[in-house]
Amino acid sequence: MATFSPPHGGRALDRIPSVPESEITEEFAEGLPAATPAPWSTSGSGLLWLHRAAPGAETQHQRGLTYERSIPLTMGAFLRYDEGSAGPYDEILTAPTFVYRNRRVSFPVPFIAVDSRASVAGGRENWAIPKTLAQFDWHTIDGRPDRLLATGDGWSIQAHVRSTGPRMPLYSRGSQVQVRADGEVLTVPVRSRGIGRLARVQVSVEGPTISGWLRGGVHTGVVIERAKHVILPGFADPLG
């Protein structure tokens, strides 16, 4: 299993496949700082929700993604990293569907936005995660995420916690799957552990493409009160 060595220079970073809302220009890519290398360790809070995938959601994955079958479940998540390898930042990410490939279930991310240029550089260079910049409005109740808003160039995603249940432990040992600018597919191991609560989440979405597959409405989710995350180096993972 070969560990992925990231490219250098902005030209490759702006060519990583994504949905239109996550695209960056060559000029912007050339001005990004040097990337903090993987692995990254972070900690913070967040809000995650799931819903049944809209018809055609699987067509919104990164161009060139190969898999055996699509699992019709869509994920959205707001994350606030208070500390970590790339410093503090806020993030919104979405997976149109989960996929089954090479005997594992993975989540592909064709749209993700942050408020940190260092995070944009690291996400794109280390793991082919097509990060772009956004502005965030983050409101909490008793320290827990409550009303969250991310806005970018022609798009916005808003989430409001309608209700929560009792505290419970959270643990995830999963993988993300991404596509490099040259078409190589990477698997990225992700580890998370923390404390959260089941929740009902009211979501609203605007945007030229994301509004077609990230559905508004009330969805089942999890308030992440506190969690630690580790994103390991990606590795080349051809299908087969």
Image (spheres, grey):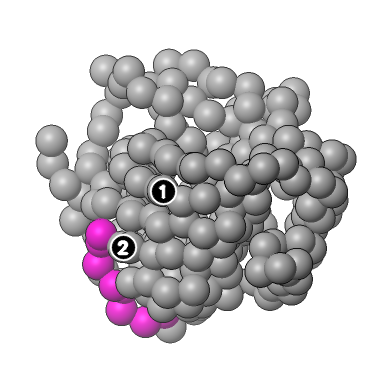
* Mark nearer the N terminus (2 vs 1): 2
Front one among 119 and 10: 119
Asked whether, in this view, residue 160 is left or right of residue 174, the answer is right
Quarter of the picture containing the C terminus is: top left
Point out residue 190 in the picture as x, y percentages from the top left corner: 36, 46
Residue 185, by quadrant, is top left
Few, some or many residues within 10 Å of mark 2 (<14, 14–19, 20+): some
Tag in front: 2 or 1:
1
Query: Given the current orientation, which residue lies at the most extreme front position?
Result: 166
Q: Which amino acid does label 1 sit on?
A: Arg
Point out residue 133 in the picture as x, y percentages from the top left corner: 59, 71
| Extent of the magenta region | 32-39
- Name above or below for residue 79 compared with residue 180: below
Asked whether, in this view, residue 165 is left or right of residue 112, the answer is right
- Residue at point 69% right, 62% down? 145
- Residue at point 33% right, 53% down? 231
Asked whether, in this view, residue 235 is left or right of residue 80, the answer is left
| The disc label shown at residue 220, or none | none
- Residue at point 27% right, 47% down? 234
From the image, tell me which residue sits under label 1. 193
Does the magenta-highlighted stretch encompass residue 139?
no
User: Do we see residue 174 in this rendering?
Assistant: yes
User: Do we see residue 64 in this rendering?
Assistant: no
Point out residue 226 in the picture as x, y percentages from the top left corner: 52, 59
Point out residue 52 in the picture as x, y percentages from the top left corner: 71, 26
Front one among 209 and 160: 160
Does the magenta-highlighted stretch encompass residue 37?
yes
From the image, tell me which residue sits under label 2. 40
